[in-house]
Image (cartoon, rainbow, N blue to C red):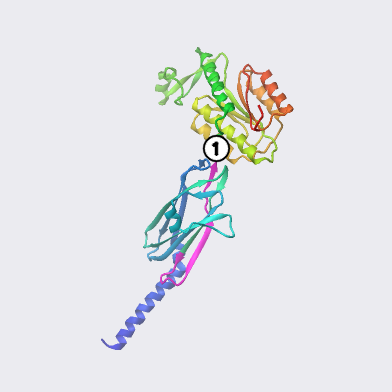
Amino acid sequence: MPVYVIITMIVAVLAVVITIEVISVNRLPQKLIFRCDVNMELTEPGEIATLSYRVRNSSILPVMSAGVSFLLNDAVEVREDEEWIRRHGYEKTENYLGRMFTVDFFLMPHRMYEGKVRISFKHRGHHEIGKVYVECGDFLGFSSVTSGYDIPKRVVCTALPAPEDQDITAVGGYLGDVSVRRFIHEDPNLILGYREYTGYEPLKNISWAQTAKTGQLMVKNHDFTVDTDVAVVVNIEDLTNKRLIEHCLSLVRTVIDKLEENKIPYALISNGDLFSMEKGVGRKHAFGVQRRIGVSNFVRYFSFEELAERVVAGGRGSRGCIIITPTMSRRNAACVSWINKHSDVPACVLVGEEGEE
């Protein structure tokens, strides 16, 4: 083969390689598509969630070297084994309150790389997960381009339940009394209307005629001689003691769990950033309350005295109250007495401060 033909072929090959290299430098980073998600919107401290991610190469060229680096916020903790931690270089960064791990891979044209990592959150709050950096190398591996952005998903971490002490145990008996009292006062002869079946009503309350008309299960909405339900009343005070704040929110979480366990409808009433919710029960209702617990900064908007007046005004004298207050000062005790004075059912009071009753 003549020398000039060989030289021409070498030049042609070099021209193709250089062209591909130039294209890869300018176009490949734009063709690398990254997505990530967390499989939970609401969790609790220590509960394991899954952070999943995928990188897709939408180019006709292969990505010879690609990488994804996650810089997780300090509240996020990776829950993988030691081998995974060693392989991904999971370590504390020097200039940032968080930890980083990296995944490197090769990606053919129109192919996708997927990965998962188990994480948990260290404490209650509304958490951002952190930042991610996607690295795309050129065709020959001489250089790379890195794009960084915030992970868009935010996760609410609600409070852990309070430890089972004598005060919390007493709530169980109180709720049992409320539940029994509610059903013995139901008057089956007075039907106010019909509503959707939630799964908690007795089967005997299903109205088959209304079910046939609407196409979904409907139950009779009976009147009550005394419409007894529960209000979870949370007195929020301006506090600097973070431990006491967290304990109070844990008490709220525990009470909500017990109400849901006993299928007792409840309303939430507070004088702060827990706000108020109408009476309800079930997964959707509990999710809304637990989310408010997670995002709360324990900020007070008005006094306990005004809160007590609102409780009395909305209770019609028959509403059972579970009152949660950080401290039991004389003013707070007077507010509790005011609620008890105007209610047929004595309130169950839980005090966040240790040593108070």
| Residue range corresponding to the magenta coloring | 136-160
Which image quadrant for residue 278? top right
In this rendering, does residue 70 appear at all?
A: no
The residue at the far top in this view is 189
Which image quadrant for residue 240? top right
Above or below: residue 136 compared with residue 236 = below
Above or below: residue 294 compared with residue 99 = above
**Residue 50 x/y as whole percent:** 45, 47
The residue at the far bottom in this view is 3
Q: Of helix, strand and loop, which one carries label 1?
A: loop
Judged left or right of residue 272, residue 6 is: left
- Reply yes or no: does residue 137 show up in magenta: yes
Q: Quadrant of the C terminus?
A: top right
What amino acid is found at the position of numbered circle 1 in the picture? Leu
**Residue 84 x/y as whole percent:** 43, 54
The residue at the far left in this view is 1
Q: Read off the residue under disc 1.
A: 160
Judged left or right of residue 72, residue 299 is: right
Above or below: residue 114 compared with residue 319 = below
Judged left or right of residue 26, residue 111 is: left
- Reply yes or no: does residue 16 show up in magenta: no
In this rendering, does residue 235 appear at all?
A: yes
